[in-house]
Image (cartoon, grey):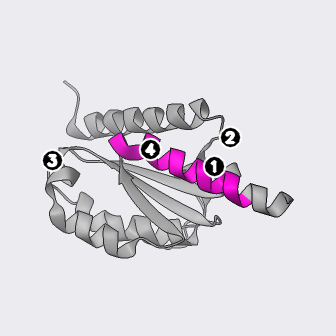
Amino acid sequence: MISQGAKAVKSGNLLEERIEQNLVAANYTVEPQSKFTDCYNNPRSKMDFYVPELDLAIECKRQMVGGTADQKLPFVLVNLSIFPSKRGLLVLDGDHYHKRSGIIKYLNTQVSETFDWCFAEDFSNWLKGATVLHEQTKNRTTT
């Protein structure tokens, strides 16, 4: 029998694979498990993805049922802010996050030029918008 923790890891890995496939399909370079020093000064921490063309760090979280996952989101946001990239993106998946209006409200108050979030099913559309913005910025600097 597989433990609950092992199920969670497998489920999270599936989300990361899905996000990576979207990035590769959009012709972006993907640096998975990109090392950095986190807010607790741990130099062995890893961000799920770094996308150099967008100077974007991505962290994925999947939660199907309640637990301590909610308490970890502020930690993720701080780490996205200190990761050496211009922008950070949190991708959420799972029934738990969809049911928690307080989480959605909190994350919406954190959105800025340097942070954004989306649900996994909206990631393709989010990426299209980021690609358009990237192209516009690139065109401005070359003209």
Nearer the observer, 127 or 16: 127
Q: Earlier in the sequence, mark 1 or mark 4?
A: 1
Q: Is residue 74 magenta?
A: no
Q: Earlier in the sequence, mark 1 or mark 2?
A: 2
**What type is the residue that disc 1 sits on?**
Val
**What type is the residue that disc 4 sits on?**
Asn
- Total numbered labels: 4
Question: Of tags 4 and 3, which is closer to the observer?
Answer: 4
**What type is the residue that disc 3 sits on?**
Val
In the rendered image, which quarter is residue 123 located in? top left
- Distance between the alpha carbons at the discs numbered 3 and 2: 33 Å
Q: Which residue is the site of mark 3?
A: 65
Q: Residue at x 37, y 53 (%)?
A: 118
- Distance between the alpha carbons at the discs numbered 4 and 3: 26 Å
In percent of width and height, residue 87 lies at: 57, 64
Q: Which residues are magenta?
A: 120-137
Q: Residue at x 60, y 50 (%)?
A: 132
Q: Would you say 129 lies left or right of 91 here?
A: right
Q: Which residue is the site of mark 4?
A: 125
- Distance between the alpha carbons at the discs numbered 1 and 2: 6 Å
Q: Earlier in the sequence, mark 3 or mark 2?
A: 2
In the picture, the quarter occupied by the C terminus is: bottom right
Q: Which residue is the site of mark 1?
A: 51
- Distance between the alpha carbons at the discs numbered 4 and 2: 18 Å
Circle 1 SS class: strand
In percent of width and height, residue 86 lies at: 63, 67
